Image (tube, rainbow, N blue to C red):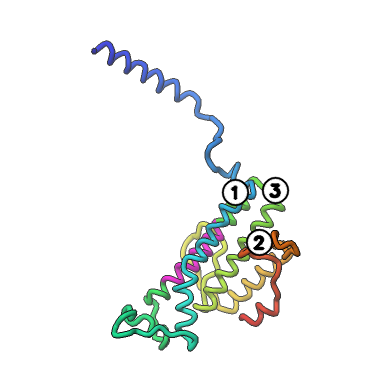
Amino acid sequence: MKKIYSFLAGCAALATIGSCTKLDVPVESQYVQANFPKTTADYTALLGTMYANLSSNYAVPYWRMQELSTDEAILPARDGNYDDGGQYRQLHYHTRTFDHPNVIGVWQWGFSGINTCNRLLTLVNGGPSPESVKASYSAEIRAMRALYYFFMMDLYGNVPIITSFPVNGLPATEQRAKVAAFIESELKAIYPILPRKSSNAAANTLQYGRPTGKWHSHYWQSCI
């Protein structure tokens, strides 16, 4: 048995030594900067993260911040049910504070989306695709980032403008007017690059829910 164990140990040692001599093998089964994103499917999977984040809190916390603080909606507490510590009354009476769950949650949601867009821009611009392809997808990402910034400006007014990834240090807060100017400049810059609506219904279905060149400056002016 000792001879068998010694033989097996020797084989294992030889296998280990032999396996360490070829370390520069090409990467074929892993996504790296040299091969991703490249195909349409790659970009669809990559950009999906900014849309997934958008849907995660838009329908409830963001809606509460927008509607329960106006006369358009009210959430009554019936015999104490649905009161949730009075947070809905605080929105209705405009007595919410910085530690209100929706105030914190929507802030984190919005800037998580902005951070995701900045990360995607870094990946796309450093990827292997031709510059024209990068410009097209970058325009889509910048449009979504502008949308997130509109949400944040609309609710909080003065917010930091962050366009890099990763973020170094604590960014300074900018005035609402400067944030609005940033959003408008972004939309004007990407408008000629975004895909146009088509007369082909099938083509429009493929673009459903994604930014297109169907944008009007007078609508934006009315929003701000």
Where are the magenta residues, as a range? 105-119
Q: Secondary structure at mark 1?
A: helix
Alpha carbon of mark 3 to alpha carbon of mark 2: how far? 26 Å
Residue picked out by circle 3: 130
C-alpha separation, residue under disc 1 versus residue under disc 2 = 19 Å
Q: Are marks 1 and 2 in contact (CB under 8 Å)?
A: no
Residue bearing the label numbered 1? 42
Give, as a three-letter code, the residue at label 3.
Answer: Pro
Give the amino acid at mark 1.
Asp
Q: Please identify, in this view, whether the residue under mark 3 or under mark 2 is nearer the observer.
A: 2
Decide whether the magenta segment is chiefly helix, strand or loop: helix
Asked if residue 192 lies in the magenta stretch, the reply is no
Is 161 drawn above or below residue 222 in the view shown?
Answer: above
Counting residues from the start of the chain, the first of labels 3 and 2 encountered is 3
The label nearer to you, 3 versus 1, is 1
Q: Amino acid at mark 2?
A: Thr
Q: Is residue 189 left or right of residue 223?
A: right
Residue at 32%, 16% (x, y): give it.
8
Residue assigned mark 2: 205
In the picture as drawn, the residue positioned furthest to the top comes out as 3
